[in-house]
Image (cartoon, coloured by chain):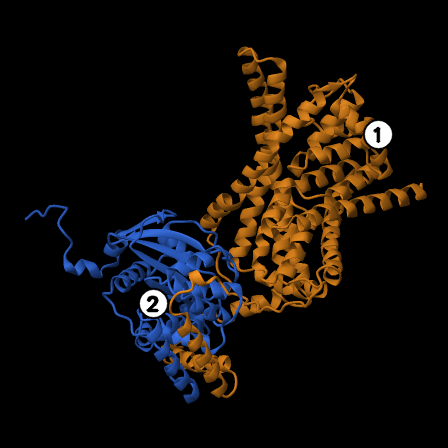
Chain colours: A orange, B blue
Amino acid sequence: MSDAASQPANSPSADRILQAAENLRRNIQGDLHEHVVEALYADAARIADRAVSRPGVAAQPTFDRTLDRILTSRLWGFPIMIALFALMFWITIAGANAPSGWLAWLLVDQGWPMLRHAAEGLGFPWWLSGLLIDGIYLATAWVISVMLPPMAIFFPMFTLLEDFGYLPRVAFNLDKAFKKAGAHGKQAMTTMMGFGCNAAGVVATRIIDSPRERLIAIVTNNFALCNGRWPTQILIASLFLGSLVPAHLAGLISAGAVVCVALLGVFFTFAVAWTLSRTVLKGEVSTFSLELPPYRPPRVLRTLYTSLIDRTIIVLWRAIVFAVPAGAVIWLSANVKIGDLSIAQHLMQSFDPVGVFLGLNGVILLAYIVAIPANEIVIPTILMLTVVATGSAEVGQGAGVMFELDSDASTKALLQTGGWTVLTAVNLMLFSLLHNPCSTTIYTIYKETGSVKWTALATLLPIVLGVVVTFLVATVWRLLQ
Amino acid sequence: MNQPATTAPKETCADCSIYRAARLKKLGVDVDRFDHVVALAGNPNTGKSTVFNALTGLRQHTGNWPGKTVTRAEGAFEYADKRFKIVDLPGTYSLLSTSLDEEIARDYILFGEPDVTVVVADASRLERNLNLVLQVLEITDRAVLCLNLIDEAKRHGLQVDDRQLSRDLGVPVVPTAARSGQGLPELLQAIGDVASGKIACRPHRIQNEPPAIKHALNELVGQLEAAHPGLPNARWVALRLLGGDEHMAEALRKGEFGRSNMTALTSQT
């Protein structure tokens, strides 16, 4: 009860009315709520009956039902779902290559020398143009050219599918699996969003009402391989795994490896959800009624517009905001020297024992720390740091300059100079799946949960899993050798 | 004879949808000043957000799955020289349960005292949607039924008699297909007329409840009206109190019936 001063004068009457309600309730037979709902439903049925008629033969009454029978069938539901998403990823990967190349040409090949030239003309000291142009500008340019095209392709496709009405069917198919893992069926949709962007996936968990199941969905969202991590997967798989088999099988094997990593992520989603719901997040699985809405022809232009504005631009903008300081840090760590070595070299050397122990190396671990703001910059950071570490003078543009090598062959040559093996490649792919979420996602998790504890768990759990898995793989690998 | 282009429109113009549409000015999120408040309620996935976007010019994300609108969205539009604030409530199947989204929608319609509550219903699933419509009509006196997805109903071979429906429900009923903009001028007209009081609603209220409940309601309504003369809907408050709604009992104890109570609710969303 609040203090007396704020009590309005009529509060005695309130008590009297509440008492009266209490007494009257006792006189009512059965459940009041049920009586009211019954009365409501009876009226609704009567009114609807009077208003709705079916004069003609239904135009296409069975189309939706036929489609549903196929898309949610026990036999075809899953294969169709996997094929559809594989197709979407393939279109994203294949379609993003060319525009990414153009953007890189424009921003890096053309823009970067132009800016350097301009800075020289303006008489910038070397450290200023280094920090601004080699560090910040190149990091941002890389993020834009690598991230924008896949997002601009993936998000509209996803939104079209959503507009058409397919997502509730996916949730329907996956409901049982998530339920068995102790999670909410709607998590299927948030996981799907996570394949585009984990931050967006975390926000999407708002559709889950129960706080317990929402936390499970938030913590496990990072196991959905996001857009920023696909380029790493694809590049490393084609460099090191595709080259193990004859050329005509290379594409198939590397694509298969990437899909395996993605499926492993789905496996971890279920495994972690299962564990959480039986330990710290115990509770009943909440039921929900999922209405399968009618299929609607998607409005293509409208969808393109909204998905570009709503998702692509916003997510890209956040990545840029985080890439700017990251670019500065990379450049500074490679150029500020303590003793004979740069900070980056010191760090790499101290990380190296741990890295090698896990079947990785110091460069990769440092790159993952530098690239916390955005997973997209992992590969350029690794290449740049490898140049710093090995002192390969013939490639690259100098310390702390992020670049993209002209051909895959020279990339591989550089990495092999840095002591890379197939084990390093496999474990890098695994670690790319199992490490902390990017800082945007971490911040989003904090905003959505409002809890430092859960944010910490969501951040640290994947790292722990990553360390365990890479260590196991490295151990088994070494035993077999 | 040449008439100047600025002549005031003839009276017959008011019936023409082109004339009505021309009087709509979409104001986006500019909700600072307004003459009327419009609440947008309805079942999930009936196109509330599409109606919201069409009226405000905003591009709130729409998607073909239930439960998409997770936060309350606000926007504004101007129609016939009046400024309207429009609030997109979360989609719910009912207003009677204790879940958060239903509580938000229910309390906004009662305590927020919107000048008009537009209930968006799926014409192809009328009976299921009417359950919510009737619940809204239990709460508020000023409502408009937006009979959306009328094109889809037609595609399924259904014909909905909107005039019969309007007579039964006691509020204006406007068939629309918001995705293509069909019927929106008429919807605006109805919203404007209900807001200005030009159309007086006589909303349908449940008739066939058991006598014991009817008696209890009358008893409580009498007491409530004596204690709170300005109460927006004593019958609904009585029904909730009778059902043991703690939230409502708390509001009664504190005497917080009215817009002041909304601040607490807004922070929940």
Residue A467, position as x, y percentages in the image = 80, 44
Q: Nearer the viewer, mark 1 or mark 2?
A: 2
Name which residue lies at 73% across and 52% down. A263
Residue B268, position as x, y percentages in the image = 50, 57
Residue A141, position as x, y percentages in the image = 59, 29
In depth, the one of A254 and B93 nearer the eye is: B93
Q: Amino acid at mark 2?
A: Ala
Residue A447, position as x, y percentages in the image = 58, 48
Mark 1 Cα within 10 Å, few/some/many (few <14, many 20+)?
Answer: few
Name which residue lies at 39% across and 48% down. B29
The answer to which quarter of the image holds residue B213 is bottom left
Q: Which residue is mark 1?
A: A419
Q: Chain of mark 1?
A: A
The answer to which quarter of the image holds residue A330 is top right
Q: Amino acid at mark 1?
A: Gly
Q: Is residue A351 above or below residue A253?
A: above
In depth, the one of A388 and B226 nearer the eye is: B226
Q: Chain of mark 2?
A: B
Name which residue lies at 62% across and 35% down. A146
Q: Which residue is mark 2?
A: B143
Circle 1 SS class: loop
Going by the image, does B226 lie left or right of A32?
left
Q: Is residue A25 visible?
A: yes
In depth, the one of A398 and B205 nearer the eye is: B205
